[in-house]
Amino acid sequence: MFDVLVYLYETYYRPDACPEPAALAKKLSAVGFDDVEISEALVWLNDLTAMAGVEHTLTASSTGTRFYVDEEVDALGPAVIGFIQFLESAKVLSPLQREIVVERALALDEGPVSLGKIKVIVLMLLWSQGKEPDALMFDDLFGSDEDQAPRLLH
């Protein structure tokens, strides 16, 4: 599924440049992606787009500290939680965007979610909202996980 998402990010500059879902599925199949993988990616992306388009004024202006419940810590792991906090402190993610990233990661129903998958989720969220990270943040999001020391909560 993540290969399909990365392909969409690299191929279509903006989400509105993507063809309709049926035509997109055919194009992805022609490129060589598996039908199950395509279907999972399109459903996941549709859910992301639906969430990203909703305005939540209470959480959008939050300045409090986010505490993660045990289920979230188990599913995300400390490195991913630290990375999400880093992105929020760097103003790459708003509190609302953070919650969307956490929800989309939990929707994967696997744990712990890898740092590479969280980076793709963040990129897809920003892409779906028509936002682009600055060059340094883009390098951090697309950089290799092995090149970096994990960001842990203290």
Image (spheres, grey):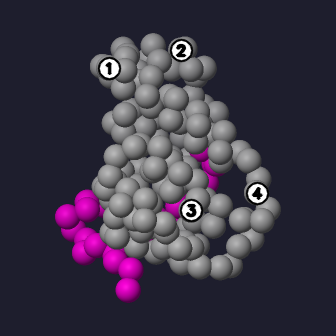
Q: Earlier in the sequence, mark 3 or mark 2?
A: 2
Q: CA distance from mark 2 to mark 1?
A: 15 Å
Residue 1 visible within the image: yes
Q: Which residues are magenta?
A: 128-154
Q: CA distance from mark 3 to mark 4?
A: 12 Å
Q: Which residue is mark 3?
A: 98
Of callouts 3 and 4, the N-terminal one: 4
For the residues labelled 1 and 4, the Cα–Cα distance comes to: 36 Å
Q: Secondary structure at mark 1?
A: loop
Residue 74 screen position, x and y as percent:
36, 61
Q: Is residue 9 above or below residue 154?
A: above
Q: Mark 3 vs mark 1: which is more N-terminal?
A: 1
Check if residue 107 falls in the magenta segment: no
Q: CA distance from mark 3 to mark 2?
A: 31 Å
Which residue is denoted by mark 2 in the rendering?
23
Query: In the image, which disc is placed on residue 56?
Result: 4
Instruction: Single out the mark in the foreground, 2 or 1.
Output: 1
- Tag 2, which secondary structure? helix
Do residues under tags 2 and 4 come within 8 Å of each other at their CB atoms? no
For residue 34, which numbered disc appears in the image? 1
